Image (tube, rainbow, N blue to C red):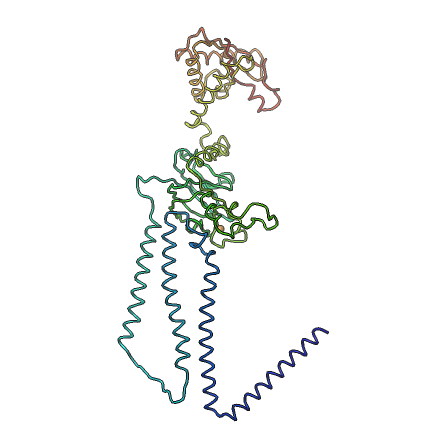
């Protein structure tokens, strides 16, 4: 029924339009051609004027309405040193093109109105005018030169690499479908080398662990931190397709290209908290973050800087978002302390660890500190069990009492400990597993304990403070039921006697 009424209405409107047209034609025939032309021109002229006003009004209205949505305006101020320079370039371009736009727009429609057809008025033909040519060549040329020179200047400033001896930190961003792997240099401040040929399922970046600079590199989780006021150089690369490293609030944007390393240098000037406090001044940021929770946190409270991929790189493109926190140097240092070396936590001692047979400097210092803490605790403790320390890093060649080369680090810790606490005397105990002949195991464990004691005595520890003893397989730590447990039972122990 409804559609029938709509159909009838449409037909009726069509009939009305046709009838009006007929009446108009009839009226024109009565009025004559000249009159019709005069009326048409007049109406076209007025329509032009109307369009001019409406369109210009619309342009200014929309610019005003969306003034707080564009980068560089309202709440979207830049948060980096070079950011305002880029915002300035955009602003000057906007003002200049805006002036040209308004002038040409007015001229176009004003002329259409002013020079509309009128009886007795004739067009004036100007075949050539040197003065005009000079003006409309010279003015755009001067304006373009200003824009290009300013632009080049800004480009050279923004894209300048760090200079030798400059204070900066470096991180690395590797893009792939669909995520960023960020790598920090660790305590040495240096990012280790990588080689794509070393890429494996576990070592997705292809880090070259023969290079000691990779040992302390760490890969943070979803949130990553940078200190405020510190110059940061980001090495950027992609593993599969084009991506783009984009930090909108810092005006940082650089393609991540497979096989072609790029970089961007910037200095954050506002911490996340600073930026939130700026947003707080705008009413739109005082609305609830989650509309379903009107009394929940406000939008400014939940604001975070983001790292986005600004290249449509595939279906999961959106999921490349990461959260960046800009914090004070102290907060940054505290965050770095919580991060774990990728190599030491994920790769060390695994089948493809190229340093399996070596003890790393970083481990030597960690172990020395750990041993120092443990011996201090053992000396101070009053419970008998606490007086015994496992010397996990002392090992022997298979079936012999010869100390392995890597044992020397732990033995040296032992020497340091004995010197630090000159009043203690200790029992050095050798233990084996229960494989093989018990008597042979007992003599092997005694020989091994003696080797350790000999090492200490050679380094000046008095023999009267050292009591070697072999226990063979008589004191297993765990039951001898798996290769791992057998290994645990083959051990050297150190017990403080007084
Ligand atoms: Cu991407």
Q: Where does residue 258 sit, x and y in percent of width and height?
A: 44, 49
Q: Where does residue 151 sit, x and y in percent of width and height?
A: 33, 57
Residue closest to the eye, 74 or 175? 74
Q: Where does residue 398 sit, x and y in percent of width and height?
A: 50, 20
Rendered view: 50 above or below 144? below
Rendered view: 469 above or below 331? above
Q: Is residue 391 visible?
A: yes
Q: Where does residue 231 sit, x and y in percent of width and height?
A: 37, 42
Rendered view: 178 above or below 47? above
Rendered view: 251 above or below 140? above
* Residue 460, quarter of picture: top left
Residue 317 falls left or right of residue 114: right
* Residue 26, quarter of picture: bottom right
Residue closest to the eye, 466 or 384? 384
Q: Residue most toward the right?
A: 1
Location of the N terminus by quadrant is bottom right
In the image, what residue occupies the spot 38% across and 71% down?
Answer: 104
In the image, what residue occupies the spot 48% across and 15% down?
Answer: 401
Residue closest to the eye, 322 or 392? 322
Q: Is residue 444 visible?
A: no
For the image shown, how many numbered marks are present on the structure?
A: 0
């Amino acid at each position: 029924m409804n559609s029938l009424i709509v159909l009838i209405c449409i037909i009726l409107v069509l009939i009305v339009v046709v009838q009006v047209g007929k009446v108009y034609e009839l009226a024109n025939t009565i009025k004559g051609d000249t009159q019709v032309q005069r009326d048409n021109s007049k109406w076209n002229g007025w329509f032009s004027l109307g369009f001019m006003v409406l369109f210009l009004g619309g342009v200014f209205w929309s610019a005003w309405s969306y003034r707080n949505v564009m980068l560089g305006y309202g709440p979207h101020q830049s948060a980096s040193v070079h950011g305002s320079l880029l915002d300035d370039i955009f602003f000057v371009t906007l003002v200049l093109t805006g002036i040209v736009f308004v002038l040409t727009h007015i001229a176009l429609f004003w002329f259409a109105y002013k020079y509309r057809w009128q009886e007795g008025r004739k067009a004036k033909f100007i075949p050539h005018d040197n003065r005009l040519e000079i003006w409309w060549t010279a003015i755009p040329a001067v304006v373009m030169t200003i824009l290009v020179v300013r632009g080049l200047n800004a480009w050279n400033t923004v894209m300048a690499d760090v200079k030798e001896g400059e204070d900066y930190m470096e991180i690395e961003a590797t893009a792939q479908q669909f995520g960023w792997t960020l790598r920090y240099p660790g305590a040495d401040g240096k990012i280790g080398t990588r080689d794509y040929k070393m890429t494996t399922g576990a070592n997705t970046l292809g880090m070259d662990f023969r290079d000691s600079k990779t040992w302390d590199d760490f890969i943070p989780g979803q949130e990553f931190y940078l200190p405020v006021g510190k110059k940061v150089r980001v090495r950027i690369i992609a593993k599969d397709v084009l991506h783009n490293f984009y930090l909108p609030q810092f005006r940082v944007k650089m393609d991540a290209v497979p096989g072609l390393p790029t970089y961007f240098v910037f200095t954050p000037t506002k911490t996340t908290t600073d930026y939130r406090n700026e947003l707080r001044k705008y009413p739109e940021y005082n609305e609830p973050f989650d509309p379903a929770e009107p009394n929940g946190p406000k939008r400014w409270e939940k604001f975070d800087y983001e790292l986005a991929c600004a290249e449509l790189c595939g279906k999961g493109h959106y999921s490349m978002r990461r959260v960046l926190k800009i914090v004070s140097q102290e907060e940054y240092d505290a965050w770095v302390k919580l991060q774990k070396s990728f190599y030491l936590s994920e790769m060390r001692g695994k089948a493809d660890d190229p340093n399996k047979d070596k003890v790393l400097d970083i481990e030597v210092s960690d172990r020395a500190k750990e041993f120092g803490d443990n011996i201090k605790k053992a000396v101070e403790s009053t419970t008998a069990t606490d007086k015994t320390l496992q010397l996990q890093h002392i090992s022997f060649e298979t079936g012999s009492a010869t100390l392995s080369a890597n044992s020397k680090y732990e033995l040296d810790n032992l020497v340091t400990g004995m010197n630090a606490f000159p009043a203690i005397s200790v029992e050095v105990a050798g233990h084996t597993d229960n494989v093989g002949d018990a008597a042979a195991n007992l003599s092997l464990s005694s020989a091994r304990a003696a080797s350790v004691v000999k090492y200490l005595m050679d380094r000046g520890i008095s023999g009267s403070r050292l009591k070697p003893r072999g226990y063979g397989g008589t004191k297993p730590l765990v039951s001898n039921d798996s290769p791992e447990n057998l290994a645990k039972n083959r051990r050297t122990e150190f017990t403080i006697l007084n």
